[in-house]
Amino acid sequence: MACWWSGWSAGINPRWRLFHGRVNAVAWLAGLGLFGLLLRFGYLQVVESGRYRAAAEDNSVRLYPVQAPRGDITDRNGEVLVTNRPSFRASLMPKQLPADDDAREAAVNRLVRLLDLDPGWLAGRLAEAYESPLTPVRLMGGLSVETVANLEERRNEIPGLVIEEEPVRVYRYGTLASHVLGYIGEISLDELKDLGGSYVPGDLLGKTGVELAAERYLRGRNGGIEVEVDAQGRQVKVRRRRPPVPGNRITLTIDRRLQERCEELLGSRGGAVVMMEAKTGEILAMATSPRFDPNWFAGGRITLGRWRKLLDDPRTPLQNRATQMLYSPGSIFKIVTATAALELGELTPEKTYQCEGTFWIKVWSYKCWNETGSHGWLNVEQALIHSCDIFFYKTGLSLNVDRLAKYAELFGFGEPAGLDIPGEKGGHVPSRAWKERLFHIPWFPGNTVQMSIGQGYLLSTPLQLVQLLDLVALEGRAMRPHIMRKVVDEQDRMVMEVTPQVTRRISIAPSTWALVKRGLYGCVNFATGTGYRAHIPYLKVSGKTSTVQNPQGEDHAAFAAFAPSDDPEVVVAVFVEHGLAGGVIGAQIAKSALEAWAALRQGRPIPGAVEAQPSRAPDTE
Amino acid sequence: MWYRFTRFWAGLNKVVFFGSLALMALGWALVLSATLPVGQDRVFPLPDYAFRQALWVSLGLVALFAGATVDYHVLLRLAPWLYSASLFLLGLVLGVGHASFGARRWFSLGLFFMQPGEFTKLAVLLMVVRLAASAPDRINWPRWLGTCLAVVGLPMALIASQPNLGTATLLLLSTMAVWIVMGVPWGVFVGAGAAAGGAGVAAWPFLKDYQRARILNFLNPYRDPLGGGYTIIQATTAIGSGGITGRGFLHGPQNRLNFIPQHHTDFVASVLGEEFGFVGCGLLLLLYMFIYLEGLRIAHRARDRGGSYLAVGIISLLTVQTVINLGMNVGVVPITGLPLPFVAYGGSSLLINSLLVGVLLNVGRQNRR
């Protein structure tokens, strides 16, 4: 037998037979190994080739989003409050960081120092990036030229650092209306989950205020570039581009000049001034204090130092005092007590109570703000004018808590007023059941006494005081308060327009409204009224003062009014923390605000105002 | 002189010689494609690696001719000396060697790194062949196998502790190939295989976590696609995406965009698979098959037992490397550091493999006609 490939024949040398057989066995083994490999290559390259081709494509072709410029925000007169300017953004390719632990840590620490990032945040972000190491991690936008220069100098020490051009949001007036405008930030994992498809990690979106409320208008549509990348995520070449569609422009109901004046009037005191058009619900000004600078957030992240500064501030500058801070409404609530009592027949226009200076229930005493008892006998109109507490204690008791609470709710307490920026709070209207559930003690008449003058457990926001005055001004209707007026696209085509809307109606006898309005008019216009400091010779103002007892410190001052008295056009509410007396500081601020409003309406300069210039916005880091 | 050369040329096995040359040329082209900078579409300027590999190929040819010229009997006589020298080098590298990827396998010789493990292959093979060739006809198998195992086991242990399990396995398998042809009863192999399998199962509870993870990653690379399984996934993806005809020389994205780690050394076959497809891979396998069967033909016709054992040993060294390397490229063998003979970038491996083929050619020159 001759072997076909070796030429060896068994006949040649029988002694070597075993050896030749064994060599052939080795040949078979080698041949089988190679043949097995051929089968495997065939499986991969012929049978499964399509799947692997797709996987290879996934590896190397990447779609990078190009951020669309966010839409501008203007005030009601078209003055631009928020826009964009060209700037730089730093991001990091996690895959390009050094593999060596020490070198990696050194590079990360350098970044943290240069950009003042939160190290915990960056570590977390890089850990998440393990799942998609080729997607850049967005670090910070809005970089100043100096920072970019610093980063460029150290680029060799931080492999994977990418600096690209990206427009940055500019809040031209700094802290002006910061709670109204809100701020933006990088999308979080949770938001990414909720919002779904059209967002990608690294996108910026509105986090609060108008930026959040109008996100879908402001955002625009991101463009993209399709690039080929290598294994480290470095761009090799661009395959295709799609330009971004800029966001729509939104016009607010805010008047920049009025807003500025109101903020100036508040000064450094904590509090809020809200002005609203009575018949439309358009918010003309929503001044709050303290404020923050949204530019700090515009780069997508705030630096660690600034974030600490905001968080450590005991005055909580991130909180919107007009819609999110709850205070007792104080004497302004007497409007509700009076209306309820008149409607339910517990009061008539002529009915009088005597103010003795101190009111007793068994052993507990409740004082009038005017402890001398010089109020004497008053009817409801006089009680509103002088803000007599004891008159309303007695009225409140005659009503009892259930009916009082019902009317409070009718007037919008305990429920958000429906402002079109998110985060508004509804406050609290107490009830017997609520107190028993929470404190396990029954409702005492003393609680009713406190509630009847807007103290105690009753809590509301300054915006709700605006709504209350609007109900009085329009005699039973309240307009939905709104800040966004219209949205237009790049070609000035209308995308969205807000139409005034009635949110709340109550039916109260016209005679009751007339009586209450007489009280509010007298409160401001009679020399003995508590709100006389808000009196303006050329404008009839009706309003009510409030001094809110504050167990934590100085009393808060509040004032709410509408004007002109016979045909109301504007409603204003002022709340000043630790302002001592609503009749003093509250009424003064409201007066100046109303004067400013009147001046603007007549095209005159605002008396006493310092006009601010728009700043070239500071760099955000 | 000319006469001597023509005689030398006439005695040279052309299939093995030209086959090896073809492999080296292909390897050079693949190394070029693998190391061309990202974004460079033309071949010129050549990358550094292409120049170095060209240098290695020329040195390899010198080694090949040297091996073919020196009588293999001389090598067999020198076997104990070469063996001792390589043991010394192995001991030295564990002490002062250069560590890379967590293994001490290299000597730093200024410009280049030398891997003494590669030279050990030849020395151990010569020693085993010498033992086998001088074995008496009426052999005491247990005693002889014990001696042989001791001879192979010492360098194996040193190499395995570098750690370089691939080369250690290679030494054992090629020794066993020599055993096969010298007529060790089949029962020994069956018993050894069963013992190895049993030991593997029994060792599982004692393995360290990372060792277990490595085995699990091999069985299912998608268990850890960016860590332990990354290389296998990227290599098989490259090979699979090549399809039947491949994506074209220099046009494999997996290769050119550096998705495959070590694609100029251990994973150079995935470059071939991606750029030349099933056709290219099939031709490569065919080329290896030709060379190896031709080598075994040389073993059949060798002048003496030493020559044929040597030929079988050399072929088994090359075949095992080829099968293990290609196997790990297609994901059927765990990743070990064995390069593809003649194709992968690397000086030590290319030099020693050329020398081995040279010795094989020398055996062939002395074949019975």
Image (spheres, coloured by chain):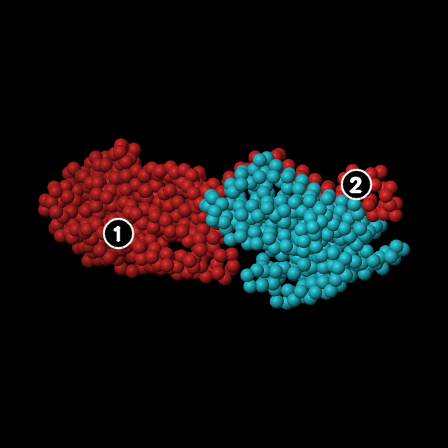
Left or right of residue A213: residue A579:
left
Left or right of residue A416: residue B96:
right
Viewer-proximal residue among B72 and B86: B72
Q: Secondary structure at mark 2?
A: loop
Chain A representation colour = red
Quadrant in the rendering for residue A312:
bottom left
Q: Secondary structure at mark 1?
A: loop
Can residue B203 be seen by looking at this rendering?
Answer: no
Going 74% across and 50% down the picture, which residue do you hit?
B365
Outermost residue to the right: B138
Residue A617 is marked as 1
Q: Position of residue A448 (x, y in %)?
A: 32, 49
Residue topped by disc 2: A7
Disc nearest the viewer among 1 and 2: 2
Q: Position of residue A73 (x, y in %)?
A: 27, 42
Chain B representation colour = cyan
Left or right of residue A43: residue A251:
left
Structural distance between the alpha carbons of marks 1 and 2: 91 Å
Can residue B164 be seen by looking at this rendering?
Answer: yes
Going 65% across and 45% down the picture, which residue do you hit?
B18
Viewer-proximal residue among A479 and B279: B279
